[in-house]
Amino acid sequence: MNKNSKLNVLGIMTGTSMDGVDISLINTNGTNFVKIKCEKSYKLNKNYQNKINNLILNKPKNSNKIKEYFLKEDNFVTDILEKKIILFLKQQKINKKNIDLISISGQTVYHYPSNKISIQLGNGKKIANNLKIKTISNLRDNDIKNGGQGAPIGSYYHKFLIQKFKEKVVIINLGGIANFSTLFSKKLLSSDIGPANCLIDDLTNYFFNKKFDKDGNYARKGKIHNKLIDNFKKDKFFKKNFPKSLDRNYFRNYFNKLIKLDKYDALMTANYMTYIGFEELLKNKKFNIKKILLTGGGRKNKLLKEILVNKLNKKIELIDKYKINGDLVEAQMFAYIGMRSFKNLVISNKNTTGVKKNLSGGILYFPD
């Protein structure tokens, strides 16, 4: 296959917010061409969110048992992904013979790169066999095996988008965890920067039995707990150099402190904790960032956007302004890097995940 050949790739994204399955069908060569053919988000109910959360919170302390423990629920996630793919193809009236490749992110349930382990539920082999379509999954594994963080793994798609802008921009994805991508001296840089929706969503579930705080309306009623913020700023994560990555529940100890506060104060403080990640990123003056483009579900949090605009003194826009659906960028991303994986092109490097050499990744499954 030559470098310009194009395929129809179905990207499947289940993020750390655990609120939905995003599906995007693109035609791409994995380098300089992407055509979005159709895409859609499917909400997952709170039962799914609670089940995965409880699975994560009740994980065994013995690291040798972690993988076996999580993989018992692999079929549960795989079946949901498969049903959503079938529904998508039916609703969009797509003959699966016209899909060349499926690329799945899987549901991240455990991320501990220092122990060379990152677990995403969702079985690529089973999906390939059941749908009779070649499927790529396990996109983080090769990076982690070679000493990288395994995340953020989709930076090369963000690079494709960034190159469309004449001015210096950074894309910040607000999922459960916040991560950034930007170009500096023509080098692609990316990293996780801190919490995004994880603490806010978990607190909203805890206090109000809802999946998320719409527009930050609950948080608006609260005040910032400054002592907790001061402790948060001292967390060892912020002392690490980029690139670095986070497990969704890395900041769980702060959740346990937040739930002891007034519920509205807790949510306002959690929003401010998300801002701290941005503040730490922008301390690095060499980036000289002119504009921040927000993507992911957290971009819809009006309160958080107001905090960022007021505190950062930067131009902050939703990526949607440029006719890019901020809910589906990550699904497009997994389709794009799936294509790169299929062609054995680079999907991570020392400046995106800390891996020692440029690497491709992913495991390709052919239907039996």
Image: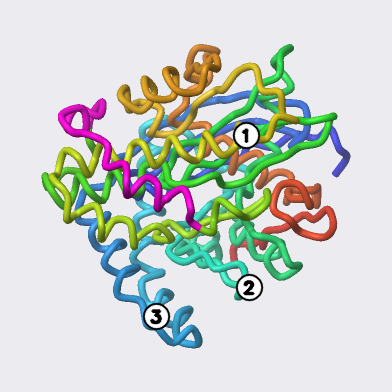
Q: Of the two numbered discs 2 and 1 on the same chain, state the one appearing first in sequence.
A: 2
Which quadrant holds the N terminus? top right
Hey, which quadrant is residue 308 in on the image?
top left
Check disc 1 and report the residue beneath it: 283
Dot 2: what SS? loop
The answer to if 219 sits in the magenta stretch is yes
Q: Which mark is residue 69?
A: 3
Q: What whole-number distance in Å separates the C-alpha atoms at marks 2 and 1? A: 30 Å
Asked if the residue under mark 3 is in contact with the one under mark 1, i.e. CB atoms within 8 Å, the reply is no
User: Could you say where residue 113 lies in the image, as x and y percent from the top left?
Assistant: 61, 67
The residue shown at (67%, 62%) is 363
Residue 24 can be seen in this image: yes
The residue shown at (73%, 26%) is 33
Front tag of 2 and 3: 2
Check disc 2 and report the residue beneath it: 116
User: Looking at the picture, does residue 181 appear above or below residue 161?
Assistant: below
Q: Is residue 213 left or right of residue 326?
A: left
Q: Residues within 10 Å of mark 1 (few under 14, many from 20)?
A: few
User: Could you say where residue 30 lies in the image, as x and y percent from the top left?
Assistant: 74, 37
User: Could you say where residue 233 lies in the image, as x and y percent from the top left?
Assistant: 46, 48
The answer to if 355 sits in the magenta stretch is no
Hey, which quadrant is residue 185 in on the image?
top right
Magenta region, residue range: 214-235
User: Could you say where residue 147 lies in the image, as x and y percent from the top left?
Assistant: 73, 67
Q: Residues within 10 Å of mark 3 (few under 14, many from 20)?
A: some
